[in-house]
Amino acid sequence: MKKRSIFSVVTVMAAMLASLAGSAFAADSPEATIKKVLEPRLGEGAKIESVTKTPYSGLFEVQVDGDVIYTDAKAQYLFIGRVVDSQTYRDFTKEKIQSLNKVKFSDLPLDLAIKTVKGNGKRMIAVFEDPNCGYCKRFQKTLQEVDNVTVYTFQYNILAPDSIEKSRNIWCAPNPGKAWSDWMLNGKEAPAAPASCTAPHEKVLALGQKMKVTGTPTIIFADGSRIPGAIDSKGLEEKFSSLK
């Protein structure tokens, strides 16, 4: 009788603990449950910033490392891609990522950039570029067709081992803006920089990584929005017009 009594007590306690654990899990919101279940599965270092239920198809939007993925309420399935309205072709995923990656233009350390002014310079952009980037050279040609703009060029050396040296030579030239233009448009190399001159390579690299700049060129506009990749003069003018 004594053994049976102890067994009964243990059984009841185990049942109570299981019930409490189940209640605690059930008490979690779907968003909290998704974060708890999914974060360990996304790999080491991955951090879920937020989980939000969407108005489409019962999906939950998961923001992780400046990107967006989707899942169901149990975090059983992952949907990696874009959610687009089939009637209007509105790209909800693109809009969300653009919103997540917005920066405050006034917070950019513009002293680390090469400043070039055309016309009245009222329209401003900041561009992350690598001196070995073909698309950046194409964008430089586009800028020749655009007036009344101030361009802040951050030399973001991520493509080739000699990008750092080329950027340093340009930065240390008597007229960095001209040296940059000469190289990007005409392939004219800047003279070797004096040993005493240092360029802000490490600071710009850290800035780009913090801002999740993954390719060149990346264009930042005065409203904080960005466009990855080269665009033509028509697209650039349309973007400027949309900011008014």
Image (cartoon, rainbow, N blue to C red):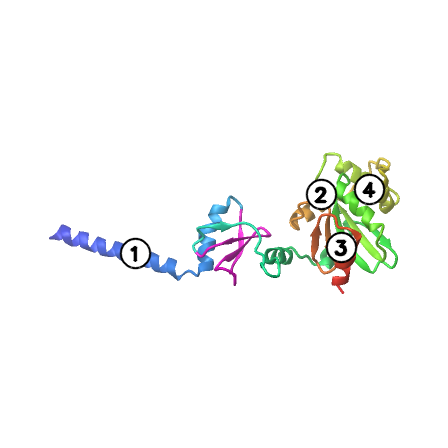
Disc 1 element: helix
Question: Is label 2 in contact with label 1 (beta carbons under 8 Å)?
Answer: no
Residue 122 vs residue 195, the one in the foreground:
122
- Observer-side mark, 3 or 1, equals 3
* Percent position of residue 172, x then y: 83, 41
Q: Which mark is residue 74?
A: none
Disc 3 element: helix
Q: Residue furthest left?
A: 1
Give the amino acid at mark 1: Leu
Q: Residues within 10 Å of mark 2 (few under 14, many from 20)?
A: few
Residue corresponding to mark 3? 235
Residue corresponding to mark 4? 184
Question: Is label 4 in contact with label 3 (beta carbons under 8 Å)?
Answer: no
Give the amino acid at mark 4: Met
* Percent position of residue 229, x then y: 71, 48
- Observer-side mark, 2 or 3, equals 3
Q: CA distance from mark 2 to mark 1?
A: 54 Å
Residue corresponding to mark 2? 202
- Observer-side mark, 1 or 4, equals 4
Question: At 49% across and 50% down in the image, what residue appears?
Answer: 78
Question: Which quadrant: the C terminus?
Answer: bottom right
- What residue range appears in magenta? 46-73
Q: CA distance from mark 3 to mark 1?
A: 62 Å
Q: Residues within 10 Å of mark 4 (few under 14, many from 20)?
A: many
Disc 4 element: helix
Residue corresponding to mark 1? 17
Give the amino acid at mark 3: Gly
Q: CA distance from mark 4 to mark 2?
A: 22 Å
Q: Is residue 20 left or right of residue 35?
A: left
- Observer-side mark, 4 or 3, equals 3
Q: Earlier in the sequence, mark 2 or mark 1?
A: 1
Q: Residues within 10 Å of mark 1 (few under 14, many from 20)?
A: few
